[in-house]
Amino acid sequence: MWLLFLFSAAIFTTALWYIWDKSEKYAVSILALIYWGATIMVFVDHTLGYLMEGGEYFDTSLDACILGSILVLMGAVIWEIFLILKDPAKKLKKVLPS
């Protein structure tokens, strides 16, 4: 299930990047890259696990849903840390003294 959560987040942020953030003011491309990287990593993990061990490809348990939510949240937290450190919109530069 976490593969579906990450894939949905990757699709949404990519569409958001193409439609809304053309000036890279909010660095949505970085968030999309984080989600696509995690999606590819989980896809490879699920595929190899399915081929080697068999069983379910999509786990629909509550634990899998919670893990998917946590992974999407962690991607957003990493993106927020990137925004704070790089300050692409130059918002912190105006607030903090030099």
Image (spheres, rainbow, N blue to C red):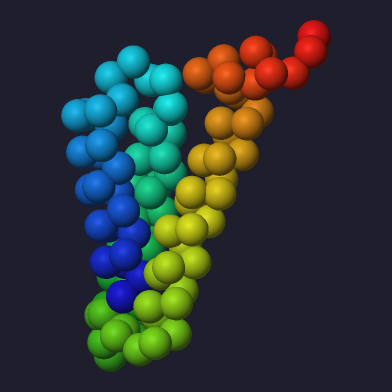
**Residue at horizontal 26 percent and vertical 80 percent from the top:** 58
Q: Residue furthest right?
A: 98
> In the displayed image of the protein, which residue is found farthest to the top?
98
Q: Decide which of 55, 19 is in the foreground and name it.
A: 19
**Where is the C terminus found, in terms of image quarters?**
top right
Q: Residue at x 38, y 20 (%)?
A: 24
The N terminus - image quarter: bottom left
Percent from the top left, x then y, of residue 43? 31, 63
In depth, the one of 39 and 6 nearer the eye is: 6
Front residue of this view, candidates 3 and 85: 85
Q: Residue at x 43, y 34 (%)?
A: 30
Which quadrant of the structure image shows residue 56? bottom left
Picture coordinates of residue 20, whole percent (x, y): 25, 28
Looking at the image, can residue 73 be seen?
A: yes
- Relative placement, left or right, of 11 versus 72 is left
Q: Residue at x 53, y 56 (%)?
A: 74
Res. 40 visible in picture: no
Question: Would you say 44 lies left or right of 70 here?
Answer: left
Q: How many marks?
A: 0
Q: Is residue 61 above or below residue 82?
A: below
Q: Is residue 46 above or below residue 12?
A: below
Residue 81 spot, x, y in % from top left: 61, 39
Residue 54 spot, x, y in % from top left: 28, 87
67 with respect to 96 (left or right): left
Position of 55 relative to 12 (above/below): below
